[in-house]
Image: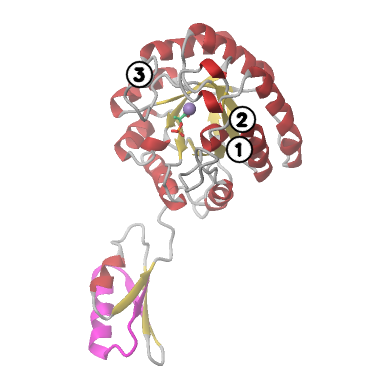
Amino acid sequence: MIIVLRPHTSRDLIEEVISEVAKLGYEPAPIHGATQTIVAAIGDESTHQNLESLSALPQVERVLRVQKRFKLASRESQPADSVVDVDGVKIGGGHFAMMAGPCSVESEEQLLTTARAVKAAGAKILRGGAYKPRTSPYEFQGLGKEGLRLLELARRETGLKIITEVLSERDVEHVAATADILQIGARNAQNFQLLIECAKSGKAVLLKRGMSERIEEWLLAAEYLLAHGNPKVILCERGIRTFETYTRNTLDLAAVAIAKKESHLPVVVDPSQGCGRSDLVTELCKGAVALGADGLLVEVHPNPAEAMSDGQQQVDFHAFRGLMEGIQPFLQATGRTL
Ligand code: PEP
Ligand code: MN
C-alpha cells in the first residue's frame, strides 16, 4: 500500500504515519519529496490489515492499494488458464462448451424435446431452471424437486451434463445431488453464505455477474468459492443494468475481455439474459466467441411464445441450429472447436 501525505506535513506527523504502518505489520519505506512525503508500506496486503483506515489521519491525503483484492482468482497467482472439467466436458483453456436449454423446466415433454434438439446441434450441457428467481411472487416459480427429477431424466436419456440454478443455502444439498454445475444467479451474485455452501458441495459452480456488480466485485465473489476450497469456478457475464431500454440488460463484452485478462477462470456469456431479445442472441453469441469466451449459456424452448418464463428471449430449435452454425467460423478463428 502507498500512503500519500498532504504537502508540507511536519516531521512529527510523518513519524506518526510511519509508526502506525509499522504497528499494523508492514515495513514502512518513506520517500521524501520537495513538498510531499509518501510512505510505501511493504507487506502482503491480503494477509495484513488494510491500511485504508489511515486516511482517517488528517495528514493523510490518499491511501493506494498496490495488490489486487482477489488473489486466488488472479492471473498473478495462476498465469495459465484454468480448465474446469465437468465429468469429461471441459471448459476453459481452449475448450469451448455450449450450454443450452429452457429458461425454466416446465414439463417432461418440453425438457426432453429440448434436450434432444440441443444435443443434436452440438450442446454438451443442458440448462434448465427448477428453482426460478422471479421478480414477481405471482409469476411461475419453477417446478422445484419435480424439475430436478426431469433434469435427471434428461441426463439419463441424452448423457448431457446438467446446469441448474440454486437459489438458497437450504437447497444446495439436494440441487447438487442432481446438478453437474450449480448456477448462482445474478440476484444471488453476492450472497456470500450461498457461495460458501456451493463451494463446499464440491460441484462446479457457474457464477453470474450481478446486475450492478463491478468486475472487481464479481472476481471477489469468485474468490469466495476458491477460498472455500472449490477450484471449479466458471464466470458468466449476463448483462448489467444501464439506462438503455432497447435491451433488457446491456451485455458487457468488455467485462469478458477484462475478466479473462485479470483471471485464469473460464468466462462464459449468457446472451439471453444479456439482451432479453431472441432476435439478437445469435449475433451476441458470435461476438462473445470472437472475443474468446469459453462457452455460451443460451435459452432454447420448443415454442418460446408459450414459455412460462423469459419467452421473449428464448430461441426455438431452428434458430438454435442456425446459431450453432453461425458461431463455427468464430470458433475456428479463435482456434477452438465444439
Ligand atoms: C436464468 O439463467 O434464467 C436467470 C434467471 O439468469 P440471471 O440470474 O442471469 O438473471
Ligand atoms: Mn431466464
Q: Earlier in the sequence, mark 3 or mark 1?
A: 3
Q: Is residue 210 left or right of residue 47?
A: right
Q: Earlier in the sequence, mark 2 or mark 3?
A: 2
Q: Is residue 82 left or right of residue 62?
A: right
Rendered position, 325 above or below 117: below
Rendered image: mark on residue 294: 1
Number of on-image labels: 3
Please say whether residue 294 is one of the residues in the magenta stretch: no
Q: Position of residue 17 (x, y in %)?
A: 26, 78
Rendered image: mark on residue 174: 3
Badge 1 element: loop
Asked if residue 94 can be seen in this view, the reply is no
Q: Which residues are magenta?
A: 1-30
Between the C-alphas of marks 2 and 3, the distance is: 25 Å
- Of residues 197 and 255, the one nearer the viewer is 255
Looking at the rendered structure, the kind of residue marked 1 is Asp
Rendered image: mark on residue 97: 2
Q: Position of residue 34 (x, y in %)?
A: 41, 92
**Residue 125, located in which quarter of the rendered image?**
top right
Q: Position of residue 95 (x, y in %)?
A: 64, 34
Contact, mark 1 vs mark 2 (Cβ under 8 Å): yes
Please say whether residue 7 is one of the residues in the magenta stretch: yes
